[in-house]
Amino acid sequence: MTFVAGWRLALRLAWREAWRAKARSALVVVMVTFPVVAVVAADVAQATASVSSAEGLARRIGAAQAGLSAIPDAGQVFQAADPDRANGWSGGRRPAASLSDVERVLGARPAIELRTLEGSPVRTSLGVLQVGATGVDMASPLAKGLFRLTSGRFPRTTNEVAVNAALADHGFAVGDRLQVANGRSATVVGIAESAAERTAPRLLALPGFFPAADHGLRSWLVGGAPVTWDQVRELNQLGVLVLSREVIEHPPSSGQLAPQLRTSYSSDRTTLYTVLALIGVMALIEVVLLAGPAFAVGARRQSRSLALIAANGGTPTQSRRVILGSAMVIGAFAAAVGIVLGIALGRALVPLLQSTADTYFGPFQIRWTHVLGVAAFGLVSAFLAALVPAWIASRQDVVAVLAGRRGDRAASRRSPLVGLLLVACGVGAAVLGARREAGATLIAGAALLTVLGMIFLVPVVVVVVARLGRRFPLPLRYAVRDAARHRTRTVPAVAAVAATVAGVVALSIGNTSDQAQARAAYQPMLAPGVSTIAMNGGGTDWDAVEQAVARIAPGARASRVLGIAGGRPLMVDAGRGPGPGGNFMSSLPVQALVSDGGSLPGLLRGQVSEQDWEAASPVFSRGGAVVLGRAGGTADRVRFSLGRQGPSVVVPAAEVATSSPPRVLAVVSPEVARALHVEVGTVGLVLTGTPLTVAQDDDLQQVLQGMDDGAYLYTERGYQVPSSERVLLWILFGLAAVLMLGGTLTATFLALSDARPDLATLSAVGASPRMRRAVAAAYAVSVGMVGAVLGAAVGFVPGIAITYPLTRNLNQPGPSHYLDIPWLQIAALVVALPVLTAAIVGLLARSRLPLVARLD
């Protein structure tokens, strides 16, 4: 009871203090609530967006008990409870199982066929569009839930189809005639949306609409009694993967899975939990550091009350409880507010995220265990943020405080040693992780150690900066010295900024280095912005192709490519000795262009330099050819032939190096073609001028597919950073900016509030009204710049280390690993953002203060 009574008094005092200092309490609430809101909103949105196996049963197997897919040439298969999550096969190859094979295991039961095709050609007003297709009888109760009818009706015969909205946007409505490229046609009788896919064009028909010759996965939906795990294993023996409602709702234990799946599941789960634990610890440290300055200022404001408690017989434990009680009151309130706002924000984000997704989300979902865990995280973070201020407040000099002097004890001299030891361990772990192929987890642990070590070193850095500030201008000199005097308020803010910058720098170095490796490995097929068109069939009307290009992409200039008509490849032997009798390499079939040695063919621009082409082109005047390769050689004679038994000719040759593997391996003169009795004609188009847009690319592809189902269109756009990585980087830098601004602004305004007497004294002795603005800006610079520089230095350790396992280059040409440091982004974090923060603080700070009485 004594314990409860002691906390009851502390909580009552904490509530009164929180209500009295509303601004400071609100600041702590914001600091604790912000991560709670962000994490709860993200968790709610992710829970709604992710469709679990149980939630997705209706969209995958309708109302059936199980969906079965016969895998051709697979032999025996093995699977997890959900075969789409993990599966594999072993044993010999055999034909796909039939429905009768399935019935020998499951017995006779209701069943319908489900056929899916991912590349069914449909004729549109532009040409041909490749769409996904599903063949199923929606009149069957087993198929209920696979598609949702929005207008019209479902197909009832093999001459009827339904389309989704994405396919209807290409010019199809109920009652229209839809024609598949191979000549089949059907009437559109309805608009039906897949329960899973949102944006991809798809048509729905009966299974008989697709001939047996069409390639597609043969599947069945079966009803009747539940399909048990033992029956699933029996069907796996026949090469059949099974999605069973019974198994999904009552999954087998990991021990019942195949050994291959057990190993991968265990490894993946361990890695996931390790990463989540590291992220949770880093987030907890960040919140503690952000909220710490506010509790430090609150403890200083209560120092006289705590001294009176101690003078009247109070124990240090009771003094600590007063400060910790504030953390519990404010933390609990912030956690509750964070939950409500997080759920509301997550609910508001779901429609926005759904509009950008290709598949439908599941039902709105709140994982209360996660939400309550995040709320506990907020409460714990507030409690931990108050630990150090509470400990320092309980050790203050009571006599000095009651006399009106500051009662802080001297800082511990062991903290820097602990910090150096942690940083050394972090650097050692980073080096060890860099030497291992799978050292990412070890490097993540090293990042945590270095950040913790940095926190212990921040007081030393703050003191050193204060000692170096004797030659600074007055506002900055005052700011750095005041920061050193009030380390309990300054150190958490500087450490929060440094931890944020360290994480962003490390991730940025890893990401840009990974992109540098991908960019170096990317091999362009053409010069940037150039497009090529090739047609598969003979007798192509190239005039019509050029007209289509001019109609869809007016800014593109089309040039014809001359080659061996009919696409017949030539066999080429590159000679390495003098004359026709030299030693020849083994014959290779190549696609050859035809040129008279004029300007560099457009198809080779970007791969062959103009100088090399000019040096080699005289060979065409002698009826020769140019052989292309990755490195120039010395072959001066080449033998071309039509097949191994066809006519051949040996001609003069020159070898030219290419910057990447060439699409053609030889350019021959017209004399070579005549000697081989082959016809020279147009084999493609090269589009230069204004590059094709993505929309023009799609439209032109449809038109070309309508002319020739083997048409090929390629546009060289160079290496493209994946959009997911680009968005992730923007989110990362945005979050870092918010955290840096929040931490710096919090520390600055708390410092200004704590320094009101000193600033009023400066004003009384003649300081200009602008001095307070200058001091406020100097506070922001001292906190933001010191934290950013320190964080950047710490972030380089894991950032450089992670590039080794991430970009290690094994048995490939090029460097052993890639390192690309984003200096511009780092400079923006270290210099531009603190300067921006200082400008904001200088504009928002009050320039005049009323005079106050000094106690000392």
Image: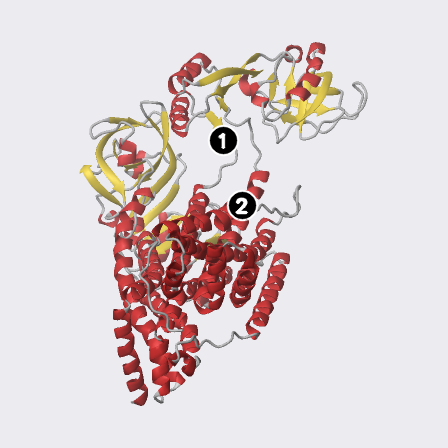
Q: Amino acid under label 2?
A: Thr
Residue 237 visible in the picture = no
Where does the image place residue 713, in percent across and percent down from the top left?
Answer: 47, 26
Quadrant containing the C terminus in the rendered view: bottom left
Q: Secondary structure at mark 2?
A: helix
Residue farthest toward the front in the current orientation of the protein: 765
Query: What's the mark number on residue 13?
Result: none
Q: Image quadrant of residue 723?
A: top left
In this rendered view, identify the residue nearer to me: 551 or 471: 471
Q: Amino acid under label 1?
A: Arg
Rendered residue at 26%/78% (across/down): 12
Count the numbered circles shown: 2
Q: Assess disc 1: are there few (<14), some (14-19) or many (≥20) residues with their C-alpha within 10 Å of its C-alpha.
A: some
In this rendered view, identify the residue nearer to me: 376 or 478: 478
In this rendered view, identify the residue nearer to me: 627 or 480: 480
Residue under numbered circle 2: 512
Residue farthest toward the left in the current orientation of the protein: 152
- In the figure, 489 relative to 179: above or below? below
Q: Image quadrant of residue 131?
A: top left
Judged by depth in the image, the label closer to the viewer, 1 or 2, is: 2
Where does the image place residue 587, in percent across and percent down from the top left?
Answer: 69, 27
Rendered residue at 24%/39% (across/down): 192
Where does the image place residue 724, in percent across and percent down from the top left?
Answer: 43, 44
**Alpha carbons under labels 1 and 2: distance apart:** 19 Å
Quadrant containing the N terminus in the rendered view: bottom left
Residue under numbered circle 1: 717
Where does the image place residue 582, in percent across and percent down from the top left?
Answer: 80, 23
- In the figure, 263 relative to 241: above or below? below
Q: Secondary structure at mark 1?
A: loop
